[in-house]
Each structure stands twice: as structure tokens, then as C-alpha cells.
Image: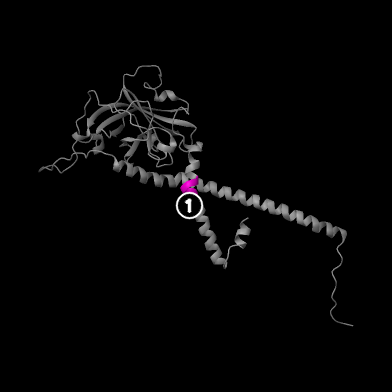
């Protein structure tokens, strides 16, 4: 999977590292901004109310 | 004759041919196992990223957002004393009032109507209290939440408030430091101070709704006191139980009269 990604990213090694690093950061940013906040209320780790 | 001889590759034996066919299957299996392995590692990284988001980023965002909410509340400015020859300009201390306090009506859901300050939590900012206790619209976004249907600040019964102990700016992170007699200072958008005093703390199961009843622990009883109750998770990083703080109203004062002595670095 990642090997496929590496082989199909253009450029010399340094450029490929940069492109994939930026892509990874972009995925993380999407997670932080949308995915994690959407998932968070369903995680049972920090319920603070009584009666649930 | 000397010279190099090119040896033809020997025809594959039956065992080698079987291995070559088996090799393709083995290659595919290894390929699948490799993808599964990479997916598992990816999930592990995402889980770690979620923890980082939960335990750090929500605090960063929450502190910023809650500070702005408090700044934008329609609070009257607190009067300051004019400086005289012997005394520097400073806040006026409001004289405590122990007569019947004004009680505001419950606002619509997700409305911020008060703030809480706890002198025992040295360094903690004023935290907003908003109507409602669901996570998606109040606790994760607006700070502490007021249990709907419970008393409002100064009201007869139990003014019950929930707040995060970790994550989302963790307004109730330091509940365990509270001692009996500590002031809990509420300021409402009606511009009234309500100073409550801690009377007890307890650790209960999450299903123990009695702690937010008008008379805590006694659901059917008619309230005669003006109490406050804070609820949050316990232990610190778990939601297994709830940490409960009970308090009773000590006095109230209009903001126009000054600030409570407890906020001025006094008792």
C-alpha cells in the first residue's frame, strides 16, 4: 500500500519525501478539523454528567 | 577446446515448477498480509493522533474560544474606587447581601448566562456557564453547562453545573483541590454576584441523578436551601465515576456594588 504510494510519487527521493510528508500533514489536518470532532461525542472517555 | 562454455539452464525439475506456481500464491498472500499490516499501523497512528487531538488540541481551541465567550458577555463594568490620598485606585468590595436574592429565568438552550470563578484554582480564568449539558452544543464548545430544569443561580433548590475535567479546556480540572468553605463565585448576565461555599464533595456512579436533585440525595423533598452542585468525571482520565461538589449560597451582591471580597485576594 505505502510501497505503491512511494513508487508512484514522482521526483527524486527528497521531493518524494516532501510530497508524502505534506500529504500526511494534510490528512492529519482534515482529521483534527472534521473527523475527530465528529467522532468525539461518541467516545465514552469524558462524560461528565450524571444520569446517562 | 578451452573457452567459456555457456551452460544452458537446466530444465526445471518437477519440484521447482511446483515451487514457482506456489511462489505466486505465496507472493499474493504476503501482499495481502502486508496491506493488512499497513492498515493496522495506519489505524494505530490515527488513534495516537486522536489522543493528541483530544488531550491537547481541544484544550488549545477551547481556552481560546471560552476566553472570547467571556469577553463578549454583556457584563456591566465593575466600579473602581477613586484614588484618595492614602488608598490607591482599586476595586470596590461589594457588601454582602443575605436577603432574598434575585433569580433569573432559565435561558434558551446553549445560551451563556453566567461565569464561574474559583479563587482556590489560582491561575484559572473565568469560565462560561451555558444552558444545557449535552456535549455537542455545550460542554465541548461553550465550557461548563447548566443542567436544564435545575435551579438558576441564587435559586431555591440545586443550581447544578457539569464541566469537563480533561479535554475541551477542562474547566473543572482542579475539582479535587477544593476544600470545605472554598468560595465558588458565580456572575450572571443579570449583573449579580452569587458567592457559594463548598460544603462537601463525593464520588458517585454516573447513574446517580440524586446529586442534582433540588435537595441533593433526596429526590422527593421540597428544597429549603439554595445549593450549587458541580459534576465532572472521575478518575481524572476516565468516565467510570463522577466527582461531585456540593455548596450552599453564602451571599449575593449586585455587580454595581463592587466585587466580592473573595475575588480581591481576601478570604
Q: Is residue B85 left or right of residue B25?
A: left
In the image, residue B41 above or below residue B251: below
Q: Is residue A19 left or right of residue B176?
A: right
Residues B163 and A32: in front is A32
The secondary structure that dominates the magenta segment is helix
Residue at point 40%, 46% (across, down)? B61
Q: Is residue A23 left or right of residue B254?
A: right
Question: Residue lying furthest bottom in this view?
Answer: B1
Quadrant housing the C terminus of chain B: top left
Taking the magenta stretch, the answer to whether it contains residue B159 is no
Q: Position of residue B208 (x, y in %)?
A: 46, 25
Quadrant housing the N terminus of chain B: bottom right
Residue at point 29%, 40% (across, down)? B73
Q: Position of residue B149 (x, y in %)?
A: 37, 26
- Residue range corresponding to the magenta coloring: A28-35
Question: Residue lying furthest front in this view?
Answer: B108
Q: Is residue B164 visible?
A: no
Label 1 residue SS: helix
Residue that numbered label 1 is attached to: A29
Q: Is residue B48 visible?
A: yes
Residues B94 and B199: in front is B94
Residue at point 77%, 57% (across, down)? B23
Residues B46 and B196: in front is B46
Taking the magenta stretch, the answer to whether it contains residue A31 is yes
Q: Quadrant of residue B162?
A: top left
Residue at point 71%, 53% (across, down)? B30
| Chain label for disc 1 | A
Amino acid at each position: 500500500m505505502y510501497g505503491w504510494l512511494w513508487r508512484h510519487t514522482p521526483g527524486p527521493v527528497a521531493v518524494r519525501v516532501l510530497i508524502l510528508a505534506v500529504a500526511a500533514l494534510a490528512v492529519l489536518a482534515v482529521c483534527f478539523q472534521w473527523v475527530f470532532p465528529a467522532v468525539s461525542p461518541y467516545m465514552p472517555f469524558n462524560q461528565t454528567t450524571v444520569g446517562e | 577446446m578451452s573457452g567459456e562454455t555457456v551452460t544452458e539452464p537446466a530444465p526445471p525439475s518437477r519440484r521447482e515448477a511446483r515451487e514457482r506456481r506456489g511462489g505466486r500464491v505465496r507472493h499474493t498472500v504476503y501482499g495481502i498480509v502486508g496491506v493488512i499490516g499497513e492498515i493496522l499501523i495506519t489505524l494505530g497512528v490515527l488513534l495516537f493522533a486522536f489522543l493528541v487531538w483530544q488531550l491537547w488540541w481541544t484544550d488549545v481551541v477551547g481556552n481560546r474560544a471560552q476566553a472570547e465567550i467571556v469577553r463578549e458577555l454583556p457584563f456591566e463594568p465593575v466600579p473602581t474606587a477613586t484614588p484618595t490620598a492614602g488608598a490607591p485606585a482599586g476595586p470596590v468590595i461589594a457588601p454582602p447581601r443575605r436577603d432574598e436574592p434575585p433569580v433569573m429565568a432559565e435561558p434558551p438552550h446553549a445560551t451563556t448566562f453566567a461565569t464561574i470563578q474559583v479563587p482556590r484554582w489560582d491561575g484559572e480564568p473565568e469560565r462560561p456557564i451555558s444552558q444545557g449539558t449535552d456535549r455537542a452544543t455545550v460542554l465541548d464548545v461553550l465550557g461548563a453547562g447548566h443542567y436544564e430544569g435545575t435551579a438558576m443561580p441564587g435559586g431555591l433548590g440545586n443550581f447544578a453545573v457539569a464541566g469537563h475535567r480533561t479535554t475541551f479546556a477542562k474547566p473543572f480540572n482542579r475539582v479535587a483541590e477544593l476544600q470545605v468553605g472554598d468560595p465558588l463565585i458565580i456572575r450572571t448576565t443579570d449583573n449579580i454576584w452569587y458567592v457559594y461555599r463548598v460544603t462537601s464533595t463525593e464520588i458517585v456512579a454516573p447513574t446517580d441523578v440524586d446529586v442534582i436533585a433540588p435537595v441533593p440525595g433526596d429526590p422527593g423533598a421540597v428544597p429549603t436551601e439554595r445549593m450549587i452542585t458541580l459534576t465532572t468525571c472521575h478518575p481524572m482520565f476516565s468516565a467510570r465515576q463522577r466527582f461531585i461538589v456540593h455548596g450552599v449560597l453564602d451571599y449575593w451582591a449586585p455587580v454595581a456594588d463592587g466585587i466580592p471580597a473573595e475575588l480581591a485576594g481576601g478570604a
